[in-house]
Image (cartoon, rainbow, N blue to C red):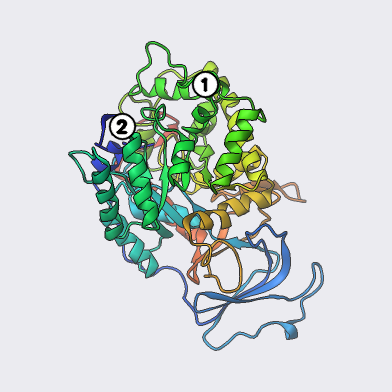
């Protein structure tokens, strides 16, 4: 969803990424407890992330950031015999988690680290992610510059900042202001990108011979790739072309309906359509899936089976387009008041120059189109999963009323709406994300030998995914009292235990201070006034 200067047809997609000044860096801090020579999570109910049903009570033993044992310590409803439990070593630490649910750290496959236009600094973004149990992110574009992102990646690995693990996927062509116009130039850029330490490349669509050369070189070097198939180039090269050439994952859904066309090669564009008009761009995008082949038709099945044969990953990012089908819901999300910076709120408002701010005159007709768009899109994604395809979870936060952390949990809810069983949702958000990044030998599931990226929540997320939101979920007690429950209690990354609710409190303080500095408050979406 962002903008760079290479050939004209990908100008809008990449220029956004390289035109921003880096956001404020994350401060060096000493937050969290640990790491410990031994950490034991006691009596929890484990959701392992690999698709197994919940199991508990178990004690999970971590030593020097590695899970070394998962021990069954009893039965539900039966007191645990303490004499049969693992012993705590001197210098060790334990978390009493009886009745709590634990699951692997979450993987956000589409996590932009803030932005100058949004006014969102790294500490703000990182703490929102960590407060929601997100312990790994893929930065698709490195909008703050590759050097900046790699610096924060290293600091995160060293646990010198409070931040998830970071995978850096550079926007193709970043730094080449004169453009990349030949296959050899493309290959050289890819080699340079690898030498600099990038983990992969984010593409936006290219002239076919350049795209093919870049993907081939990237694959030869053993790096991974993602692509937002920008509409300016998709008529020449769709998702099937990219997957055949070596692309490892696609973002959003652009390029997929085009591969499913049967009676046309270009989507229907009205005569007055202009891609640089955000209302046109998003309005017509909502009418695209109904132009594709019918679900389960021969052509629909053929394309799906071909992508499956290539072990291709789909990262749909359902949440980032949800305002298109229900603008009021996105604007009135309950977390905006306490956790959305005023600068970010302003960025969301209707504008003719801000990407994603297409609310020039958004109405019922557009929302009805988008609801049908979602139905068809979700049908493909769910069936892809049913046939063994890898589907991951990404949020693309910082745009279109989607807030870091909160938007990722909304993505999980939308996966559930698409037809995923809650255990399939968790697997998409953990193990499948780790697989797509080539990190599943280290993270992605609670398994002996893997790193201690684990989250602890007091409620059952399989019964209600809303309990993973920082704001929790509303519940009526037996005493007829309305309470909020849930929210991640602890986020454990590299064996370091973070108080997730304290991280959220830190974010709220940042927001409160920003509002006070500006003498600003959000009374209702889109309205502000000076305080008396």
| Dot 2 alpha-carbon crowd within 10 angstroms: few under 14, some 14 to 19, many 20 or more | many
Front one among 482 and 350: 350
What is the distance, in whole Å, between disc 2 and disc 1 at their CAs? 21 Å
Helix, strand, or loop for circle 2?
Answer: helix
For image coordinates 49% across by 46% down, the residue present is: 394
The circle drawn on residue 12 is: 2
Which residue is the extreme one toward the bottom?
A: 90
Pinpoint residue 366: horizontal percent, then vertical percent.
51, 19
329 over 152 or under it: above or below: above
Do labels 2 and 1 touch, CB within 8 Å? no
Say which of 426 and 238 sits in front. Answer: 238
Please identify the residue farthest to the top as the structure is shown.
271
Query: Is the N terminus in the top left, top right, bottom left or bottom right quadrant?
Result: top left
Please indicate, yes or no, whether residue 155 appears anywhere in the rendered image. yes
Residue 169 at least partly seen: no
Question: How many residues crowd mark 1 within 10 Å: few (<14), some (14–19), many (20+)?
Answer: many
The x and y percentages for residue 313 are 52, 47
Would residue 299 be found to the left or right of residue 477 on screen?
left
The residue at 47%/25% (across/down) is 285
Dot 1 lies on which element?
loop
**Labels 2 and 1: the sequence-earlier one:** 2
Q: Residue at x 57, y 40 (%)?
A: 306
**In the image, 192: left or right of 429?**
left
368 versus 518 height, above or below: above
Front-most of residues 438 and 458: 438
Answer with the quarter of the image where residue 360 lies. top left
Q: Quadrant of residue 172?
A: top left
Q: Which mark is residue 58?
A: none
Q: Which residue is mark 1?
A: 287
Q: Picture coordinates of residue 419 (x, y %)? A: 68, 40
């Amino acid at each position: 969803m962002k903008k760079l200067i290479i050939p004209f047809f990908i100008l809008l997609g990449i220029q956004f990424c390289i035109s921003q000044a880096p956001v404020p860096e994350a401060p060096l801090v000493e937050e969290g407890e640990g790491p410990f020579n031994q950490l034991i999570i006691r009596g929890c109910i484990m959701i392992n992330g690999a698709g197994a049903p919940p199991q508990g009570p178990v004690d999970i033993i971590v030593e020097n950031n590695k899970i070394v044992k998962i021990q069954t310590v009893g039965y539900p409803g039966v007191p645990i015999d303490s004499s049969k439990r693992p012993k705590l070593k001197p210098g060790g630490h334990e978390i009493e988690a009886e009745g709590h649910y634990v699951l692997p750290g979450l993987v956000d496959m589409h996590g932009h680290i803030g932005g100058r236009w949004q006014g969102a600094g790294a500490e703000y973004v990182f703490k929102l992610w960590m407060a929601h149990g997100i312990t790994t992110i893929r930065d698709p574009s490195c909008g703050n510059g590759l050097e900046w992102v790699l610096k924060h990646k290293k600091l995160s690995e060293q646990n010198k900042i409070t931040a998830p693990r970071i995978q850096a996927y550079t926007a193709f062509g970043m730094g080449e202001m004169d453009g990349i116009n030949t296959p050899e130039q493309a290959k050289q850029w890819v080699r340079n990108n690898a030498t600099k330490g990038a983990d992969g490349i984010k593409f936006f669509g290219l002239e076919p011979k350049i795209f093919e050369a870049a993907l081939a070189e990237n694959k030869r070097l053993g790096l991974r790739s993602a692509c937002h198939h920008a509409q300016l180039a998709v008529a020449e090269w769709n998702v099937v072309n990219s997957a055949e050439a070596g692309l490892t994952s696609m973002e959003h859904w652009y390029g997929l309906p085009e591969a499913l066309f049967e009676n046309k090669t270009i989507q229907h564009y009205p005569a007055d359509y202009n891609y640089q008009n955000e209302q046109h761009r998003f309005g017509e995008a909502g009418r695209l899936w109904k132009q594709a082949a019918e679900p389960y038709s021969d052509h629909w099945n053929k394309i799906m089976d071909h992508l499956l044969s290539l072990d291709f990953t789909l990262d749909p990012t359902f949440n980032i387009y949800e305002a298109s089908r229900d603008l009021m819901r996105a604007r009135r999300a309950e977390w905006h008041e306490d956790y959305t910076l005023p600068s970010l709120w302003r960025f969301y408002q209707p504008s003719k120059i801000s990407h994603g701010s297409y609310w020039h005159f958004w109405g019922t007709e557009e929302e009805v189109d988008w609801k049908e768009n979602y139905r068809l899109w979700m049908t493909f994604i769910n069936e892809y999963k049913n046939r063994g395809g890898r589907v991951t979870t990404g949020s693309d936060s910082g745009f279109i009323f989607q807030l870091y952390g909160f938007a990722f949990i909304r993505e999980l809810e939308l996966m559930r709406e698409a037809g995923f069983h809650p255990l399939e949702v968790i697997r998409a958000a953990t193990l499948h994300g780790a697989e797509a990044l080539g990190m599943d030998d280290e993270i992605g599931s609670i398994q002996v030998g893997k790193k201690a990226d684990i989250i602890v929540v007091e409620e059952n997320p399989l019964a209600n995914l809303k309990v993973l939101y920082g704001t929790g979920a509303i519940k009526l007690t037996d005493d007829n009292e309305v309470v909020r429950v849930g929210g991640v209690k602890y986020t454990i990354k590299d064996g370091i235990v973070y108080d997730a609710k304290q991280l959220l409190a830190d974010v709220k303080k940042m927001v409160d201070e920003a509002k006070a500095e500006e003498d600003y408050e959000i009374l209702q979406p889109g309205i502000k006034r000076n305080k008396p």
